[in-house]
């Protein structure tokens, strides 16, 4: 995971990543500079799809099986969105910090559940 994050950071700071940021900010201005914005968007889409496919394959290997009903409950999807929102969607470091914060809060709530009385008077 760390190697992948470092590789993506390197790609974001490369000329290719700068063109993608320019396309994000102002596609018409990027086209005026002579860049084929369609090809850059297609490359970014293909790279994102390949990374998601790799993540799905690794997740399936970790689980040992693939089943649409048991893989992701709506609560897991909601948790991932909360992690991204808490950490900030503008950068990868923020999403990682958000994941640690949310998982930390979930872990802490499980650990502290025995300290709370279950049958109040």
Image (spheres, rainbow, N blue to C red):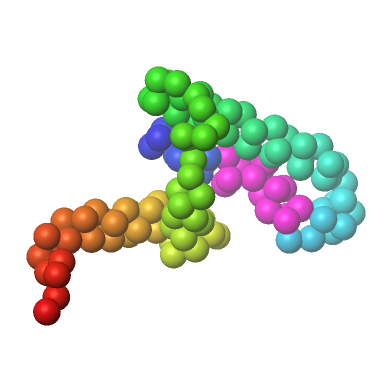
Which residue appears at 50% of the width and 31% of the height?
A: 55
Residue 66 drawn above or below residue 52: above
Residue 46 to residue 25: above or below: above
- Residue 48, given in percent of the width and then of the height, sits at 63, 37
The residue sitting at 70% across, 48% down in the picture is: 20
Q: What residue is shown at x 82% (from left), y 56% (from top)? A: 27
Label the magenta part by its dominant secondary structure. helix
Residue 85 appears left or right of 29? left
- Residue with the most extreme bottom position: 121
Residue 45 at x, y = what percent?
Answer: 71, 38
Q: Give the left or right position of residue 61, taking residue 67 as reference.
A: left
The quarter of the picture where residue 95 lies is: bottom left
| Along the viewing direction, whichever of 43 and 29 lies nearer the viewer | 43
Q: Position of residue 41 (x, y in %)?
A: 76, 42
The correct choice, above or below, for 4 with respect to 105 in the image is above
Instruction: State whether residue 97 appears in this view.
Output: no
Residues 121 and 96: in front is 121
Magenta stretch, residue numbers: 11-24
Residue 92: % across, % down: 48, 51
Tell me the quarter of the image containing the C terminus.
bottom left
Whether the magenta-drawn stretch holds residue 102 is answered as: no
**Residue 113 seen in this snapshot:** yes
């Amino acid at each position: 995971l760390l190697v992948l994050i470092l590789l993506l950071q390197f790609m974001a700071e490369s000329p290719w990543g700068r063109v993608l940021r320019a396309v994000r900010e102002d596609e018409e201005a990027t086209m005026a500079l002579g860049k084929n914005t369609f090809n850059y968007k297609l490359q970014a889409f293909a790279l994102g799809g390949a990374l998601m496919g790799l993540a799905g394959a690794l997740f399936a290997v970790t689980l040992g099986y693939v089943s649409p009903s048991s893989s992701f409950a709506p609560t897991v999807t909601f948790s991932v969105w909360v992690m991204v929102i808490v950490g900030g969607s503008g950068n990868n470091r923020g999403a990682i910090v958000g994941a640690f914060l949310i998982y930390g809060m979930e872990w802490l709530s499980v650990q502290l559940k025995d300290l709370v009385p279950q049958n109040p008077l």
